[in-house]
Amino acid sequence: MGNLKFRIFLFFTLSSFLFMPMKIYAEDKNQSWQAQEQKLDKEIEALKKKLTELKGRSENKNLKKPNKEVQKLKDENLKLKKMILDIENARKSDMSSLYQELGTTYIQTKLFGPAIDAYTKALSLNPNNAEINYNLGLLYQHSQGNTKKALYHFKKYLRLEPEARNRKEVESLINMLEETPVVEIK
């Protein structure tokens, strides 16, 4: 009996060491993503500040500048607005990818709740990403048994990816889930 207790203790001790590096890796990734997000925030703020300065210069009525220079300032103003928009869109896409990668890491470590949170954040930044919807559908179905949310994400996946290679499998899964009676837990 003592030998069995020792084996059980050894198993749980070793498994915690096996999964600890993945959890630390996930936390390190999250911190590096936050640092990258802060850097992008600073760049956006600097561009917005420059845009405001240029806008003020071009709208200053006390300046008697030729039309060419005013037009040049307006063109630069428009170019900066486009740069800011491009950076913000790229930032959203990058952050969505980072949260998606974080979600995958959580799945690998069997941390399904945090995986759902990470994928949900990724989806909020990139709502038309079919892969994220598919992964959320799987997570809701397998880890939480939430048929309603799983169906929503599987159907959205097929709407976004009508030519999906796994279309027949997902359609079968949807049919199976729709035929399964929903049991509410109180």
Image (cartoon, grey):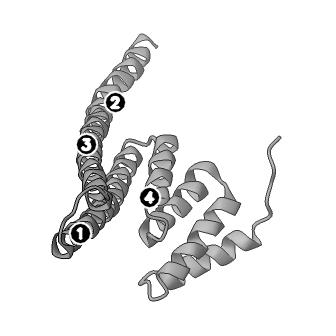
Earlier sequence position, callout 3 versus callout 2: 2
How far apart are the two marked residues, 1 and 4, measured between alpha carbons?
Answer: 24 Å
Taking the spot 23% from the left edge, 48% from the top edge, the residue there is 43
**Discs 3/2, front:** 3
Q: Amino acid at mark 4?
A: Leu
Work out which quarter of the rendered image holds the C terminus and state it. top right
Q: CA distance from mark 3 to mark 2?
A: 41 Å
Q: Which mark is residue 15?
A: 2
When the figure is inspected, residue 101 is found, relative to residue 93, above or below; the finding is above
Secondary structure at badge 3 equals: helix
| Residue picked out by circle 3 | 42
Residue highlighted by disc 4: 125
In this view, 53 is above or below 39: below
Mark 4 Cα shell of 10 Å, populated few (<14), some (14-19), many (≥20): some
For mark 1, give the secondary structure.
helix
Between circles 1 and 4, the one closer to the viewer is: 1
Viewer-nearest residue: 52 or 162:
52
Label annotation for residue 44 = none
Return the x and y of residue 68 as percentages of the image width and height.
Answer: 17, 75
Q: Amino acid at mark 2?
A: Ser
Which structural element holds mark 2?
A: helix
